[in-house]
């Protein structure tokens, strides 16, 4: 037998196969078509032995080409059908990613804590340590060692809450964080570079600007050769770290435990000194007090004021989130614990 | 302190604009609260005379006033003030006039009668809070004159906030001296003429029984003609915030405001015994002060008595009614004293009575200004009250106060301020403040006695700083010395970690008041014994220091629920207070972590919502233990006050009780008006962080496969799952990688009081694949151990 009939049959089989593959609409139909094609090619292959020996290789070659062509077409079609099936399956698995129920409840640090940590971190960056002390203090640490002699009118600047311990008016809720200065100087020799955040108490009627309990941070530096220039420059560096591009302002004032003393203010970070509601249109925000450690304070803790000098400053922590986050009232910030407030920050 | 610019100019020729003066005052430490130009907001208010007052046809309390105001102009106005009478000269705001506060006067009908303008009180003119009635102007005021001219309202008033160390600046003279120094202007205070010292003035005597409380007392005698003070004096007093009373009283107030020199004028004819005695009061002694209030005195108060030792004034604070000058007075005894400041402060505080005089005496007035002050008053009284003063002066001043002499080193000035000043420059800066200097470097600074704040070198250095101007000192930065590291302590870092664990668990940080009431404790099922009491609470709700953060947190949960937010998770890290430990003076302060989770845990729509479970609070305990790597935690079921009796436990770390966890008791929930369950925990953070730790070392990870199997036991209800797990761990040994409780249930089939607990175990070796021959005996050993230890029955 000549090669021709089988060669023609192979090319017919390819034609049939390509049509069947193209017609297959799903993977099952494709698999059935492939089986029929394989059967036809197997049948052709069985008849090769009836072809003249000299022509067998030509038939074999034609058959191989036909099989490869069919297989390639089947593979391509399978890829298409698999992709379609996969897409259909995913389409059936649709979930609405906008379907959320209650708002996801992450936890929140209190806005005061957030600022508190930021303040600690800024001073740690300057190489300072963080210290604390008791919230209930004795008269010595809160007043006397800080150069508030008994009966001194400066004591009246700070309405004090006393507790029923010891002699009358001997034990009190600290009116400022300054007693931690005394405890620190009593317990460790200079040099001291420290900040002391903490809770403080005054006998105040609560309103939008006042709370009987509030938070302060105090800074104390004691070393050789510390100057008023150091005090002012350090505060300015600190303010810039906290508020950005601002200036510090110092106006002479009076505190029993520092001399010279000054009120410390910052140029309004919200209006760049052009005047806004936050700064009452003055361009400046008064934040706290500062000064050089009074020699009487050094004497109270047994340090030689000729050898050591130092500065201290302090201000209210609560004021910062009030200003920064435009919170309307100290009562909202503290003690209300309204989750509609706490979850905002 | 209100300082009118015109008054300052009596002592120094200052011409700078008010804004520049205000800046200077701030830089000098005399803080300007406000710059008040009272006349700036007043237009078209003129002096008018009331011709007649007639009743309003339809109202009892308001009347009609016919007024004339020059040039034959006359109108009728409606007025509600009770003090108007025909003949008075008063400020009249015409239709179209402006008053402070952008208040424009219009023609108005009041109860049917048209008012052609308004008569003004001092408050309506922006002159203080006195709203007693229409301001009465001097009789001789020209009708139709602008009230700004009549009242001196073209002036500028600096409202100053004076710090307690600067009594001198509570007088115009002190303010003027600082400004003169700042602007480099001359400053002049007329010197008092020499006085003739006597022991008695005629029959008038002075006895000081308490010289330590009254180191100086000057007395003068004068005849006076009582009346009103002249307009210029009334104007200045009003601008300074005081109400004119009579010429004699006004003069004493004027000298007080000008010189920080409070004075008292007694009606000499009402002083029994013709003299005064200064003595300490006796306990329970009574007197009626000028304000008509009867005061009960004690042995800490100083009184000025008449010659028969009956109290006529509380020294330095307020005069008495009995010897007050009034229209009938013809002869006065003028007293000018120096009282010891602390005593005045104590009495004023105890009596709750503060006056312009006490505010000055308690800061410390100039003892050496007493005679000059009296002299200034008599000079003014001669001018405004026709006074004729007896030239004789009684001066009880046994130990005259000298100027403080302070040694000042320029090197010290520069070391404190960071400046580079020579001694000559330092002297030049302080001399205009009235400080006399001797020598070069160091030099002696002899400080004026009206500056009690100047007694030490550092006090003079502060004056240098004020004079240099803080803004002119070069700013440098004090960083910690090289080699020292600024960082939080371990305890501080762990406190942050504790808060972060809670935030990670979805809790919001709360801050609740540390001052609470005993009722707050009882409300949440705690007892109020062993608490620290506030001695002088402002409110009963703030009468004790909290011994627990739980009341505050539960109050916060209840508050949120009442506001429509019942599903909350809150925590607080705060101090609690217990009575002092033996031998201590101060309370036992501890930092507590409290947390509450309440209501529903929201999961919908993906999963069903569920009610809060006590386990939500227990999970937090485990998260903390894991974060801190604590080695030994135990949760011991016990009824905790305020918590559900069989859903609460103590937390033990290394066997020590450090707090509690549990479900809030139903009766507490009911009292708080809470519907859903609430779980809470409270832990002593110091004790928690003091717990023994697991080493923070890497545990090698096995590359061999695990063997997993489950075991379920039936045990009695009160057998703790944690104890069974501990038995499992002990019996299984090192091959056990983990054991987890995965199922727990009760059923009728199990019988009452029993439950099933099922554990998943995973075993693994580091060096080989485990085989059944190894696992089978391990499994048996675990089962035997649990059965034996917990009276358990194996379910499968």
Image (cartoon, coloured by chain):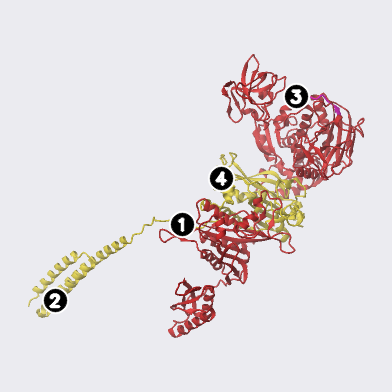
Asked if the residue at tag 3 contacts the one at tag 4, i.e. Cβ–Cβ closer than 8 Å, the answer is no
Which picture quadrant has residue A275?
A: top right
Highlighted range, magenta: B221-232
Is residue A75 shown left or right of residue B371?
left
Q: Chain of mark 4?
A: A
Q: CA distance from mark 1 to mark 4?
A: 26 Å
Q: Position of residue B627 (x, y in %)?
A: 55, 66
**Do discs 1 and 4 belong to a common subunit?**
yes
Image hue for chain A: yellow
Secondary structure beneath dot 3 equals: loop
Where is mark 2, residue-wise?
A: A43
Q: Earlier in the sequence, mark 1 or mark 2?
A: 2
Q: Nearer the viewer, residue B137 or B666?
A: B666
Binning the other alpha carbons within 10 Å of mark 2 as few (below 14), some (14 to 19) or many (20 upward) gives: few
Residue A190: x percent and y percent? 71, 59
Q: Is residue B55 above or below residue B411?
A: above
User: Which residue is denoted by mark 1 in the rendering?
Assistant: A104
User: Which chain hosts label 2?
Assistant: A
**Observer-nearest residue: B476 or B150?**
B150
Mark 4 lies on residue:
A328
**Badge 3: chain ID:** B
């Amino acid at each position: 037998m000549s090669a021709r009939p089988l060669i023609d049959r192979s090319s017919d089989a390819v034609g049939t196969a390509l049509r069947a593959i193209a017609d297959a609409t799903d993977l099952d139909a494709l698999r059935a078509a492939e089986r029929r094609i394989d059967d036809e090619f197997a049948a052709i292959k069985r008849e090769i032995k009836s072809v003249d020996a000299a022509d067998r290789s030509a038939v074999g070659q034609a058959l191989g080409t036909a099989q490869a062509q069919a297989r390639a077409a089947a593979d391509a079609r399978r890829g298409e059908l698999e992709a379609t099936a996969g897409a259909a399956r995913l389409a059936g698995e649709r979930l609405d990613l906008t379907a959320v129920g209650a708002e996801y409840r992450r936890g929140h640090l209190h806005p005061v804590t957030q600022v508190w940590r930021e303040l600690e971190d800024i001073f740690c960056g300057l190489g300072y340590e963080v210290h604390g002390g008791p919230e209930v203090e004795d008269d010595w640490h809160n007043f006397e060692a800080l150069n508030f002699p008994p009966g001194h009118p400066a004591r009246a600047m700070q309405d004090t809450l006393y507790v029923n311990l010891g002699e009358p008016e001997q034990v009190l809720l600290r009116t400022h964080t300054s007693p931690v200065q005394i405890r620190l100087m009593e317990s460790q020799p200079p040099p001291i570079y420290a900040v002391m955040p903490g809770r403080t108490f005054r006998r105040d009627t609560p309103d939008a600007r006042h709370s009987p309990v509030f938070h302060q941070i105090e800074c104390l530096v004691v070393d050789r050769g510390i100057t008023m220039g150091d005090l002012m420059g350090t505060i300015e560096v600190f303010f810039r770290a906290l508020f950005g591009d601002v200036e510090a302002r110092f106006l002479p004032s009076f505190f029993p435990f520092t001399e010279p003393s000054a009120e410390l203010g910052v140029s309004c970070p919200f209006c760049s000194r052009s005047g806004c509601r936050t700064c009452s249109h003055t361009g400046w925000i008064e934040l706290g007090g500062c000064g050089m450690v009074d020699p009487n304070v050094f004497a109270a803790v047994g340090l030689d004021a000729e050898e050591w000098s130092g500065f201290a400053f302090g201000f209210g922590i609560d004021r910062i989130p009030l200003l920064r986050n435009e919170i309307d009232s100290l009562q909202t910030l503290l003690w209300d614990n309204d989750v509609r407030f706490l979850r905002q920050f | 302190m209100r300082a009118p610019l015109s008054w300052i100019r009596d002592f120094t020729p200052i011409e700078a604009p008010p804004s520049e003066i205000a800046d200077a005052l701030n830089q000098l430490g005399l803080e300007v609260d406000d710059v008040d130009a009272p006349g700036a907001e007043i237009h078209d208010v003129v002096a008018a005379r009331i011709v007649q007052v007639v009743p309003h046809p339809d109202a009892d309390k308001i009347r009609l006033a016919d007024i004339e105001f020059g040039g034959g102009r006359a109108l009728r106005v409606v007025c509600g003030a009770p003090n108007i009478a025909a003949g008075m000269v008063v400020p009249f705001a015409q239709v179209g006039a402006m008053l402070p506060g952008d208040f424009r006067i219009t023609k108005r009908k009041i109860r049917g009668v048209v008012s052609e303008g308004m008569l003004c009180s001092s408050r309506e003119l922006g002159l203080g809070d006195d709203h007693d009635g229409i301001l009465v102007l001097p009789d001789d005021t020209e009708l139709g004159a602008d009230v700004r001219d009549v009242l001196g309202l073209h002036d500028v008033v600096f409202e100053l906030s004076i710090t307690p160390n600067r009594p001198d600046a509570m007088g115009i003279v002190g303010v003027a001296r600082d400004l003169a120094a700042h602007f480099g202007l001359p400053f002049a205070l007329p010197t008092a003429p020499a006085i003739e010292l006597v022991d008695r003035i005629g029959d008038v005597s002075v006895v000081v029984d308490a010289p330590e409380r009254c180191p100086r007392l000057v007395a003068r005698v004068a005849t006076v003609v009582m009346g009103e003070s002249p307009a210029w004096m009334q104007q200045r007093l009003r601008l300074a915030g005081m109400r004119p009373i009579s010429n004699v009283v006004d003069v004493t107030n004027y000298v007080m405001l000008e010189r920080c020199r409070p004075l008292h004028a007694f009606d000499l004819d009402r002083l029994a015994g013709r003299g005064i005695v200064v003595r300490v009061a006796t306990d329970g002694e009574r007197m009626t002060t000028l304000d008509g209030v009867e005061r009960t005195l004690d042995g800490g108060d100083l009184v000025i008595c008449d010659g028969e030792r009956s109290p006529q004034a509380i020294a330095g604070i307020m005069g008495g009614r009995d010897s007050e000058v009034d229209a009938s007075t013809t002869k006065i005894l003028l007293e000018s004293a120096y009282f010891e400041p602390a005593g005045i402060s104590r009495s004023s505080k105890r009596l709750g009575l503060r006056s312009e005089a006490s505010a000055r005496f308690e800061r410390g007035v100039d003892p050496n200004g007493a005679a000059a002050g009296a002299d200034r008053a008599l000079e003014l009284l001669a001018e405004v009250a026709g006074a004729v003063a007896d030239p004789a002066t009684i001066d009880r001043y046994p130990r005259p106060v000298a100027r403080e002499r302070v040694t000042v080193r320029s090197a010290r000035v520069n070391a404190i301020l960071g400046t580079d000043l020579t001694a000559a420059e330092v002297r030049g800066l302080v001399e205009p403040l009235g400080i006399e200097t001797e020598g070069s470097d160091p030099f002696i600074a002899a400080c004026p006695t009206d500056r009690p704040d100047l007694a030490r070198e550092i006090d003079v250095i502060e004056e240098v700083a004020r004079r240099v101007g803080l803004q002119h000192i070069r700013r440098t930065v004090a960083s910690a010395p090289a080699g020292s590291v600024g960082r939080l302590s371990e305890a501080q870092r762990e406190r942050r970690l504790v808060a972060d664990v809670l935030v990670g668990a979805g809790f919001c940080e709360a801050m609740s008041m540390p001052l609470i009431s005993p009722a707050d404790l009882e409300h949440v099922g705690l007892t109020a014994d062993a608490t620290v009491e506030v001695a002088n609470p402002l409110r009963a709700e703030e009468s004790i220091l909290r011994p627990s953060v739980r009341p505050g947190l539960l109050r916060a949960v209840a508050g949120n629920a009442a506001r429509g937010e019942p599903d909350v998770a809150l925590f607080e890290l705060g101090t609690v207070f217990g009575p002092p430990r033996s031998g201590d003076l101060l309370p036992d302060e501890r930092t507590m972590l409290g947390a509450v989770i309440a209501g529903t845990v929201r999961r919908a729509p993906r999963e069903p919502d569920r009610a809060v479970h006590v386990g939500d609070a227990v999970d937090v305990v485990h998260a903390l233990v894991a974060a801190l790597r604590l080695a030994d935690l135990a949760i011991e079921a016990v009824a905790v006050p305020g918590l559900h009796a069989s859903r609460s436990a103590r937390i033990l770390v290394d066997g020590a009780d450090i707090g509690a966890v549990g479900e809030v008791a139903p009766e507490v929930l009911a009292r708080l008006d809470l519907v859903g369950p609430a779980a809470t925990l409270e832990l002593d953070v110091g004790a928690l962080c003091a717990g023994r730790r697991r080493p923070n070392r890497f545990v090698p990870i096995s590359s061999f496969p695990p063997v997993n199997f489950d075991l379920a036991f039936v045990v009695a209800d009160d057998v703790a799952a944690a104890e069974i797990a501990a038995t499992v761990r002990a019996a299984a040994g090192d091959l056990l990688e983990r054991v987890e409780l995965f199922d727990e249930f009760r059923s009728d089939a199990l019988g009452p009081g029993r439950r099933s607990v099922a554990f998943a175990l995973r075993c693994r070796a580091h060096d080989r694949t485990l085989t059944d021959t190894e696992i089978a005996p391990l499994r048996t050993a675990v089962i035997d151990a649990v059965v034996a230890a917990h009276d358990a029955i194996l379910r499968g």
